[in-house]
Image (cartoon, rainbow, N blue to C red):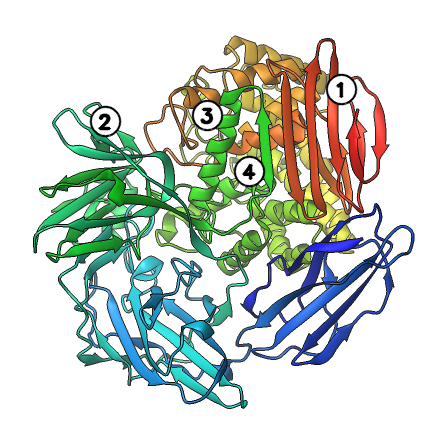
Amino acid sequence: MRAVRLRTSYLKNPMGMDITKPRFYWNCEGGEKQTAYEIMAECNGKEIFHTGKVVSDAMTHIPYAGETLQSRDIVTWKVRLWDEKDQPGAWNSASFEMGLLEESDWLAKWISGDYKPKKKERYPVDCFKKDFQTKKEIKKARLYASARGLYDVCINGSRLTDFILAPGMTDYRKRIQYQTYDVTGLLQDKNTLELRLADGWYRGSSAAYGVTEVYGNQTSLIAQLEVIYTDGSKDVIATDGSFAWSNDGPIRFADLKDGEIYDAEKKPSYQGKAVEIMDSAKNKPHLQASNNVAVQEKETFQPKLLIAKDGTKVLDFEQNMAGYIAFSIHGEKGQKLVLKCGEVLDEEGRVDLSGIQETRPAKGWSQMDLIKKLMGAPIKGATEVTPKQEINFVCSGSEDSYKTSFAVFGFRYAEVETDIAIKPENFTAIAVYSDMETVGEFNCSNPMINQLYQNTLWSMKGNFLDLPTDCPTRERLGWTGDAQIFFYTGAYMMDTAAFFKKWLLDMQDAQYKNGTIPAVLPYQGVDMMYKATGVSVGWADAVYLIPYRYYKRYGDLSVLEDCWDMIEKYAAYLWKHLGMTDKKAAKENPYNAYTYEKGVHLGEWLEPEKFRDKEYGAQAKHPEECTAYFYLSMTTIGEIAGLLGKKEIEAKCQEYAKGAKKAYHSLIVESGKLRTNRQAKLVRPLALGLLDGAEKEDAQKWLVEAVKDYDYCVGTGFVSTPFLLPVLAEAGEVETAYRMLENTKKPGWLGEVADGATTIWENWEGDVSHNHYSPGAVCEWLFSGVCGIQVEGENYFVIAPLPGGSLTDASASYQSIYGKVSVAWKKEEKNISYEIEIPANTSALVRFPDGRKQTLGAGKYHL
């Protein structure tokens, strides 16, 4: 037996991490059962950790417990395993490298351009340069870099592409990520280090309204290049006031949302000097290693040329994505090329951005203007739209090449405006997203369901760029509700372990003193809006649901430990704000002490219009939704407390959960409101466990009637849609669930597929964003329901496939943290055959649709 897929703190051979007590992970290959393991680690030729033979089947979350790790340490660790026959296997090894752990390690200074930025003004990209020489034979060289803004690095003409959109998105007031690069192979005797600095999330357009200067109006960067020679000596090239600077280079404007203006005639002169930034102790940035997968360039696409009715040329890359464009062009000096990127075309065949654009003052937002906008008042004076998603390119007169550097667009199409003859083959679209490993695969006999799966995967890719955004066009915000409902789906599709660990840090950074969190995070302005909606149930619940679901999927108790303070503060907020706000209603409510409705709640957001009540979209009280989610919060937080040994809080949560269930029963069941054709009102209590016995059976029956009455279309909104098919299946209505899944009418998942979608739409009509992953949460059921793959605990699965609908076959595989599990079924005349593979060192309970059960150990099975 051999250990494979070695990981350190969820990462493959990470460089520049600052986790001083990392954990080790592996899967098993060969043999059936791991009975023991042995780990050895060394640094600089010295053994620093050795477990000896440990009798255990554990292959995840094995803590490093060796000598204290120091800055820059390069650690090689290896592991070997003993199988069920107590025979040892071969060693396998991996490595990790520490970053800069102490503030004193940073010799570099924060630097900025030599100009004083004016409020609301936009500036060209800053360019910095330093020439240096190396003196001896080089052993290794590392570059550590970060920015308040976006940066990139070029050494001796080679641009570093390890990280795109570096340093990534955090609340810059709390924490700024830095990256570590191995640049050993790039150095020569004489060297040039060049750095560029753009606005990014720090100073550029943010959120739907394009608010600028969210974190400040002065961008800056920091970089430290350490050259280690074979004789042990070291040179450090650190940013300071000696760096040459200018902002007269080719990128005249760069904005994540609005695009770039690039003048190929221009080259940076570097005639000025960088200015060192002197931060006060209070405002000094806290640098932290990203400890996350990097945002990188991924798939590329070549376009076909379309011609609009008026003759306008449009490039169709045939896949909606988040990314940017590279091209080569030869025009006369000063000739221009404009590319306008978008997701859809209008009736004339031209790119249409109207569904994703907002209007903003041309002079930029003032606080008062923003308040008036949120209250519905018109904007006075000159206006403009955002996002523009444009590339404005000026030719040099020679053969020019271009690739976007500091912008990212949500697009499938690029409308071309130029007098220059273009060739589609000279244009390439490049998808950009966090470098998460694809761990899931699904396929079935219905090609439209397969396309739905691919659409969901592409919407995940388009929105997982260092944070989980709602869409890559209009808002680009880390909405908490979207992330929590999609968590399990995303984890089936891609390895999100490191990604969500980072975002949970963002969540802890964002928590308010009262215990709530904003509806979007990290902070991106418009606080008055996102703080108010942050308490909305289904969104606020991400504070405990994501840590809990993370634990359930990855078995990582440390995440619950790390997030406990945040979760406990939110529980305290809930307890403090129980009770109906209307005094008369509160007096008449026998369970008022367990009823929750405080704050602004979005309710069943994006519920089809047929079912929307008068309070839809209003800042209204939603005691039904709120009390249901209060029950969920108490059952879940209580379970978390129990796992962490916090018995008093566990008991308190259990008490409140019992009361909340009674309160919900009084509000909904006894009042007769449960008898409804509104799918969400039935799905919610069934999914959250609020009904028992005859009441549960009645609700299941009424839900089926409601589904049939709506012609098997989806009638749920934002927070209930993920539960719809599982609830039907649990009720024994597997065929009803399949009929909804396979329905090609709207509202419905395959209605979008029938319309040619390549990503998931924000709403069923398709008149706004075409890249919102959250409705794709239905794909969780493709794994857990259709093929029945469920992670039930450490080294343990439940396999409970549910064949049905028009499907004659289906297959899925999932590279879980415990190994790759796969299930395939096929209808053969009157029988159904199953192919199941259980990974080494795990077991599974198989539940067949006819009620049979079978326990399987590691291996391949034909059943």
**Image side of residue 209 versus residue 464, left or right:** left
User: Residue at the location (62% across, 39% down)?
Assistant: 630
Helix, strand, or loop for circle 1?
A: loop
Tag 1 near tag 2, CB within 8 Å: no
Q: Which amino acid does the dot numbered 1 rest on? A: Pro
Disc number for residue 346: 2
Q: Position of residue 665 (x, y in %)?
A: 67, 26
Mark 2 to mark 3: distance in Å?
26 Å
User: Residue at the location (73% across, 77% down)?
Assistant: 48
Q: Earlier in the sequence, mark 2 or mark 3?
A: 2
Disc number for residue 849: 1
Q: Earlier in the sequence, mark 4 or mark 2?
A: 2
Mark 3 to mark 1: distance in Å?
32 Å
Q: Which amino acid does the dot numbered 2 rest on? A: Asp
Number of other residues with Cα within 10 Å of mark 1, as a class: few under 14, some 14 to 19, many 20 or more:
few
Which quarter of the image is occupied by the C terminus?
top right
**Image side of residue 35 versus residue 328, left or right:** right
Q: Nearer the viewer, mark 4 or mark 2?
A: 2
Residue underneath mark 3: 607
